[in-house]
Image (tube, grey):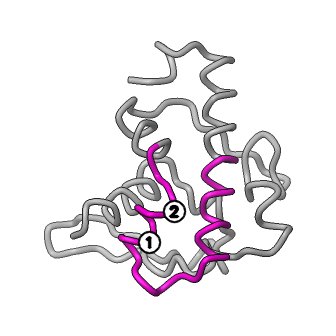
Amino acid sequence: MNPILGNFVFLHNLCRTPAHVKRPRSPRVPNVLYTEDWRTILIDHSRSFRSSKKFTERLVSGKNALGNRPLFIRELPRFFVEKIRALDSSSIRNAVGPTLDKKEIEAVLIRKKLLLDEIDASIKELGEDNFLY
């Protein structure tokens, strides 16, 4: 798997970003694929690339959420946050090729900033050593 695409999958698995960046169609029908060795792969992230104003101003959940049920991130690996910070238009384009258009990539980068704002607020609230491991 492409390392950058792997980072996207890891992002979704690690901090449950489907709840932060997209709203599943039904919580009873998760978009999850299990491999023979029981790896969990989240599939169908098409709704994660919405570029409308509603989905580029706030995350779907979190402290400043669109939804009414906040889901707070309480800890993350330091290297993971560094990988999120390193994402840019070029690395996303290299990972997804022509699958996303410029507007969709910009929407991902906007949500990256929203997610990092949430992470930075948690670091400030909990302390870096308590939040990052």
Would you name the residue on which mark 1 appears? 93
Residue 67 among magenta residues: no
Residue 62 found in image quarter: top right
Residue 28 vs residue 74, the one in the foreground: 74
Q: Which residues are magenta?
A: 86-114
In the rendered image, the vertical position of residue 118 relative to residue 36, given as above or below: above
At label 2, the amino acid type is Ser
Would you name the residue on which mark 2 appears? 89
Q: Mark 1 and 2 residues: CB-CB less than 8 Å, in contact?
A: yes
User: In the picture, which quadrant includes the C terminus?
Assistant: top left
On the rendered structure, is 34 left or right of 63? left
In the rendered image, the vertical position of residue 48 relative to residue 98, given as above or below: above
Task: Identify the residue at image location x=69%, y=27%.
Answer: 121
Q: Indicate the position of residue 108 as horizontal and vertical percent values.
A: 60, 64
Task: Identify the residue at image location x=67%, y=66%.
Answer: 107
Residue that sits furthest to the front in the current view:
90
Q: Indicate the position of residue 63 as horizontal and vertical percent values.
A: 78, 39
Residue that sits furthest to the left in the current view:
37
Q: Indicate the position of residue 79 as horizontal and vertical percent values.
A: 35, 34
Q: Indicate the position of residue 130 as horizontal and vertical percent values.
A: 50, 15
Task: Identify the residue at image location x=63%, y=29%.
Answer: 120
Label placed on residue 60? none
At label 1, the amino acid type is Arg
Q: In terms of secondary structure, what is the magenta stretch mainly?
A: helix
